[in-house]
Amino acid sequence: MVKINPIKKITVTEQVMEQIASWITSNELNPGDKLPNERLLAQEFGVNRGRIRESLRALALIGLITIKPGEGSFVNKSESPIPAETIGWMYYNEIDNLDEIYAARKLIESEVFLEAAKHMTDDDISVLEKTLIELKSLSVKEKNIVDFQQLLDEFDLHMGFCSKNKIYNKLMQTIVHLRHESMLKILNIPGAWENSIEWRIKLVLAIKDHDDKMIKEAINLNFTRAKQFYRKAD
């Protein structure tokens, strides 16, 4: 006899969420469209405004809409960045598990970088080179790790964009948020700062030369060294 679980009741908030989400996923509402205001939605659904507000906040949390104070709620583009809070809550139990973060990074980032290298334009390469210049301009002595990490994130997020794969792009966004705390620890370890720049320089040069072998070597170099830094940070 199979186990049958009791049917869970769907709350009013969840019902409102599902209907609004269906408008978006079925393209009844398009990216950039403004949703009706809370008062009108409450009237149409026959619920109080508190329920509408809860539903809209939940939809914003999963990245379907953006709530602009004083303006209203708007449908996001499909490639809109995933909210950092969403990723933080999804993986809150794994944030401090450096071994699992390293394994996920190696798997996902490697594939994203390889795919991005196939589609990189001269303009894309210029964006990466500009970021590298900014990275090298930061003083190692002053160790402004927050600014340094932000530039690394910009570099890697652009690689995700260049992959031309929307799923890869979102996976890279997820990894960048997921690795945030561990990166802060690692960048304090001697040599990590320099390594972050060195392997990215090798990667960009290999992409410019259309050298697939060197692209793979640059990526492997990063994760071979990164494993050592993760061990020191743990």
Image: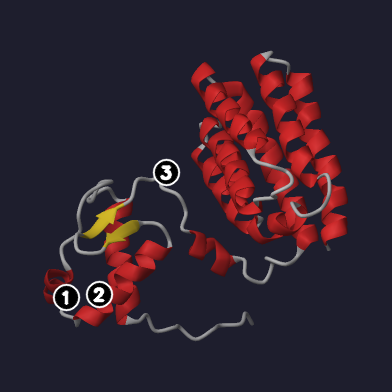
Q: Residue at x 37, y 80 (%)?
A: 10
- Image vertical order of residue 163 relative to residue 208, above or below: below
- Image vertical order of residue 23 relative to residue 113, above or below: below
Q: Earlier in the sequence, mark 1 or mark 2?
A: 1
Task: Return the x and y of residue 105 as percentages of the image width and height.
Answer: 71, 48
Report the amino acid beneath label 2.
Answer: Ile
Mark 3, other Cα within 10 Å: few <14 / some 14–19 / many ≥20:
few
Helix, strand or loop at disc 2? helix
Gap in angstroms between the C-alphas marked 3 and 2: 25 Å
Q: Residue at x 31, y 72 (%)?
A: 55
> Decide: marks 1, 2 in contact (CB < 8 A)?
yes
Q: Of residues 45 and 233, which is closer to you in this image? A: 233
Q: Quadrant of the C terminus?
A: bottom right
Give the quarter of the image for residue 22.
bottom left
Residue bearing the label numbered 3: 79
Mark 2, other Cα within 10 Å: few <14 / some 14–19 / many ≥20:
many
Q: How many marks?
A: 3
Q: Residue at x 53, y 28 (%)?
A: 127
The label on residue 122 is: none
Residue bearing the label numbered 1: 42
Q: Is residue 47 left or right of residue 109?
A: left
> Decide: marks 3, 2 in contact (CB < 8 A)?
no
Gap in angstroms between the C-alphas marked 1 and 2: 6 Å
Report the amino acid beneath label 1.
Answer: Ala
Residue bearing the label numbered 2: 52
